[in-house]
Amino acid sequence: MTPARAPVPPSDHYADRAARHAARRDEEARRSARISRLRLLTFLPAAACLMSAFARGASPVFIWVAVALFVAFAALVVWHARVEERVAWFEALRAVSTRNVARVARDWPALPPADPPPGLDTTRHPDALDLDLFGRASLFQWLGPAATPSGALTLAGWLLVPSDKALVLGRQQAAAVLAESDEWREQLAAHGVLAAGARHAEIALFLEWAEAPGPGQRRNVLLHVAVYLILAAIWMLLGLQLAGVLVAAFWLIPLLAGIVLSFALTPMVHRAFKRAGTGQRALSRYAALFEHATRAPAPPGVLATLQLRLSADGASAPQCMRQLNRILGFAELRTGAAIFHFPIQAFTLWDFHVLFALERWRRAAGRHVREWLDALAELDGLSALGGARYDNPSWCVPQIVEAPRFVATAMGHPLIPDGRRVPNDVELGPPGTLLLITGSNMSGKSTLLRAIGLNAVMTQAGGVACAESLRMPVVNLQTSIRVQDSLELGVSYFMAALARLKGVVDAAEASAGGPVLLYLLDEILQGTNSAERDIAVRAVARHLLDAGAIGAMTTHDLNLAGEEPIRSAARLVHFTETIDQHGGMTFDYRLRPGLATSRNALRLMQMIGIEL
């Protein structure tokens, strides 16, 4: 099964969109420049009319002209702000479409960096380095960038940690829906560009306030009673005095009590306003993201569940955030109109009413904020998988099966551009067998291992696979491809390779009753002599075969194919090269059955100018 084809090649589709968004941005920018000039042409005459009115004894004509011009100026300011928002919006859309062009072309310098997200520990996942999951020219860079930092963390987690079959199938279904919602995905990414200034630390501070238990019930009730009793006393006594029933200003007594209460609790009120306001300003950048997320297609399944999570007691996340914005807008009286704050606070205890509203909001919606962010992050990750599915209509939707076999037809490396990628049929398993890949240098052995690993990662994340078809079970993927020594830790290359192999063997032997282990081993134990290496490689192979693991191993040592246990268990395949009549060497990267029959190390030395 493959996703529906795009009506035009994705690169052309995205390039056309980038051009249209740039044209709309430029049109709005020209409109903004005209409005800016109109603002100046209304403000200066308005100021001149006002000055003339006062200079001529406040002539009504000049005053009314000034008022009309100032009203026009205010309207232009509002209009100008909206036009500037549209300029920023179309620029964000253009940036997203340009990024999509680069992603389709695998133009790595044109794509944003893709280091592992903060908070993600990749040291326990050697396959992240072996398979180029993160960094330049990586799977994470190709799939992303995510619209939000939490979305990036979620997507990275899906790439690193295998999910069970139900989760994988649910993500496949959701990605299929989002693949057909190209404009929705583009706009989500554009909202992410505009929300890029939201600081994680500020959001964390807001979550800390939103999820805090709040004041105790007894304290809360006492404060409410005190505030409303004071207010009732102030206005009742003031009304009686104004009605002539009371002569003395007894209302000053509860007024003074209210002022004392306000000053006594000012630190608590300020702290609540600050904690809610600081994080809310960061989250306000997410308001459009939440709004857009609630408009995602939501057929039954994962997407419908995510939509339900973007709500609190029947109100959607955007509605709750707008309500919080209104409450915090009332809190701005203290700083935005400080000259009026004291009398208003004295007669109405304004800050306490805002505090009570904040507490009500926190009790109703505060505990849901993290859930909203998590749901948005999952939707963000699914959007990335949907984009990969839309961009590659010829790739397959992998089948998750129970049989411990990895079977792919016309499988390629997903990070290699279409024009250079060479597909091959690959089969790993059943348990008790291994795929032994031989071939000369540069022929494609390591690339094949990475292609297998990356397609397994994509499958278990819920994405498409770079193949005509792929069937595999949920696996525990273990690799040893790119081993590095460590001067800092005093670890030689050979010891680093041994440690990596020990991890693979231990994982295989511990996998009983769990997901089958899929191993990918590239030229293991190169850092020792050939006699001992042969013994060690055969020992590793025996452990993996006995543990029921499936996988592939590359080697230059052709003698290994004739030694047990590899001779009985291995299915032999190889890559080769072609040397033309002028001595030039070419590779077709086609996998062939059997053992390699050629070597090219000396030829390569001669080709780069080292005489033998």
Image (cartoon, helix red, strand yellow):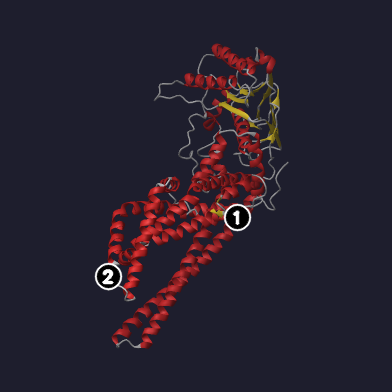
Q: On the picture, is 45 further left or further right than 133?
A: left
Position of residue 80 relative to residue 202, above or below, is: below
Q: Residue furthest right?
A: 1
Q: On the picture, is 539 further left or further right than 485?
A: right
Q: Which secondary structure lies at badge 2?
A: loop
Q: Position of residue 283 (x, y in %)?
A: 46, 52
Residue 457 is at least partly visible in this image: yes
Query: Which dot marks residue 62?
Result: none
Kind of residue at badge 1: Arg
Query: Which dot marks residue 295?
Result: 1
Look at 33% across and 85% down and name the residue there. Answer: 53
Look at 41% across and 79% down and name the residue there. Answer: 69
Q: Quadrant of the N terminus?
A: top right
Q: Position of residue 482 (x, y in %)?
A: 52, 27
Query: Which dot marks residue 249?
Result: 2
Q: Quadrant of residue 19?
A: bottom right
Q: Position of residue 256 (x, y in %)?
A: 27, 62
Look at 40% across and 74% down and name the residue there. Answer: 40
Position of residue 357 relative to residue 129, above or below, is: below
Q: Which secondary structure lies at badge 1?
A: loop
